[in-house]
Amino acid sequence: MERLRHLEVPLNGHHYASDGSEIDTETKDPYERVCISSVAFHEGVHAFLAIKRGVGVKQASRIPGPGYLGKTEPYDFDGVAAVGPAALGLEGCGHDLRLASYKGVNIGAAKATGRQMVSEDPRGLRRVSAVIEQKGSATGGELEEALNKGENVLVRIRRRDGTTEERLEEDVRGETVMVPFQEYKLPKAA
Ligand SMILES: [Zn+2]
């Protein structure tokens, strides 16, 4: 008797199934290897939150200009996106916090919401920041594409009988990948 289950396996980690099989996963995300600068990450937080909040982004850039190191232009002001970098304890948030205060944002509540949204999708934030890093300046469309693209994860399964199987899975949720898995029932001990 066999049954199909969906196992939650840590990304770049491994898992022992209850039938004795071993499952290893390895992300093939091209953004994983990008070295992200602090400015790109700061702007990435603004952009990620603006997209997730449904406000959207015209452009996000890590290219310095007069009086700023990088810049994210949302389509509309959003308090959570504005205070996101400060919520994560990043540097260079003086202007963000002054603007949020001026707009009447409840800073404590907005920070808590931002932290929660980042904790639900840390890899999404990483992807958005990596695109800003790589391109220097990215459009909202480019950032949303990176955020929503399915992530390829190489899954290797070693059965207890020694057979192996490799395949790609895309259903990544936070730090885990969902692996459809046919579990073999162990023979009952005699
Ligand atoms: Zn900022």
Image (cartoon, rainbow, N blue to C red):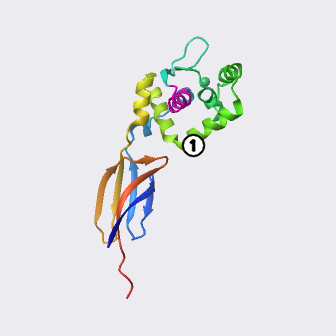
**Magenta-drawn stretch, dominant element (helix, strand or loop):** helix
Identify the residue shown where x is 44% and y is 58%: 14
**Residue under the point 57% across and 39% down:** 117
Where ligand 1 lies, by quadrant? top right
- Above or below for 67 versus 80: above
Q: Label 1 crowding class (10 Å Cα cut-off): few <14, some 14-19, many 20+? A: few
* Local secondary structure at mark 1: helix
Dot 1 amino acid type:
Ser
From the top left corner, tell me how far across and down residue 138 is, in percent: 44, 22
How far across and how far down the image is residue 71, in percent?
A: 55, 19
Residue 92 occupies quadrant: top right
Residue 130 location (% of width, % of height): 46, 32
Tell me what residue is drawn at x 32 percent, y 70 percent. 2
Position in image of residue 23 (x %, y %)? 39, 60
Q: Report the residue marked by disc 1.
A: 119
- The quadrant of the image that shows the N terminus is bottom left
Q: Which of 5 and 89 is in front in this view?
A: 5
Q: Which residue is drawn at 70% across and 29% down?
A: 106
Q: What stretch is highlighted in magenta?
A: 43-55
Q: Is label 1's Cβ within 8 Å of ligand 1?
A: no
Q: Is residue 126 above or below residue 137?
A: below
